[in-house]
Image (cartoon, rainbow, N blue to C red):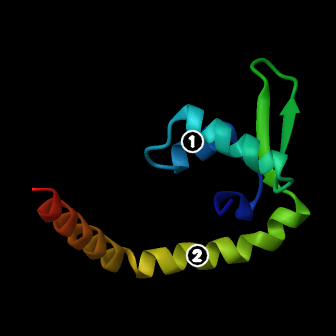
């Protein structure tokens, strides 16, 4: 959703911009967002067909909140990583 906040994007643009996402996961996510009414899909009948995705008006209202969540995640990335390591160490020591 964050990538679409700057305007419509082709499927291939989205896939290149999201590091490590599989084609299947991107397709499932876009379908889910479309089903929820947050993203619209437009097909241009060319050869091959051109498919563009954009935020709907309701999706645009969520865009700012998504940006805040991304900012929070970036600010707390190290804390989360340390918490995961600490948890994993405790879990490993209780199973050994």
Marks 2 and 1, the one that precedes in the sequence: 1
Q: Quadrant of the N terminus?
A: bottom right
User: Which residue ends up furthest to the left in the rendered image?
Assistant: 96
Labels 2 and 1 touching (C-beta < 8 A): no
**Helix, strand or loop under label 2:** helix
Residue, x 44% and y 75% (percent of image)?
A: 74
Q: Residue at x 83, y 22 (%)?
A: 46
Residue 15, above or below 43: below
Percent coordinates x, y for residue 29 in the rendering: 66, 45
The quadrant of the image that shows the C terminus is bottom left
Question: Does 84 sit left or right of 39 as displayed?
Answer: left
Instruction: Please state the horizontal and vertical placement of residue 7, each as a whole percent of the image.
Output: 76, 58
Say which residue label 1 marks. Answer: 15
Crowding around mark 1 (Cα neighbors within 10 Å: few <14, some 14 to 19, many 20+) is: some
Identify the image quadrant of residue 25: top right
Q: Choose top left, top right, bottom left or bottom right for residue 83.
A: bottom left
Q: Secondary structure at mark 1?
A: helix
Q: Residues within 10 Å of mark 2 (few under 14, many from 20)?
A: few
At 65% from the left edge and 63% from the top edge, which residue is drawn? 2
Front position among marks 2 and 1: 2
**79 or 86, nearer to the observer:** 86
Q: Nearer the viewer, residue 16 or 95?
A: 95
Image disc number at residue 57: none
Residue of label 2: 69
- Front residue of 14/26: it is 26
Left or right: 52 as drawn, with respect to 96: right
Q: Quadrant of residue 43?
A: top right
The percent position of residue 27, horizontal first and vertical second, equals 66, 36
Could you give the CA–CA distance between mark 2 and mark 1, rounded to whole angstroms? 21 Å
């Amino acid at each position: 959703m964050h990538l679409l906040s700057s305007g419509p994007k082709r499927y291939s643009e989205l896939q290149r911009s999201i590091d490590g996402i599989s084609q299947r996961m991107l397709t499932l996510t876009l379908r889910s967002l479309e089903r929820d009414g947050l993203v619209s899909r437009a097909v241009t009948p060319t050869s091959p067909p051109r498919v563009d995705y954009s935020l709907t008006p309701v999706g645009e209202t969520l865009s700012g909140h998504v940006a805040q969540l991304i900012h929070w995640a970036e600010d707390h990335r190290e804390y989360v990583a340390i918490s995961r390591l600490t948890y994993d160490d405790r879990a490993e020591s209780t199973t050994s």
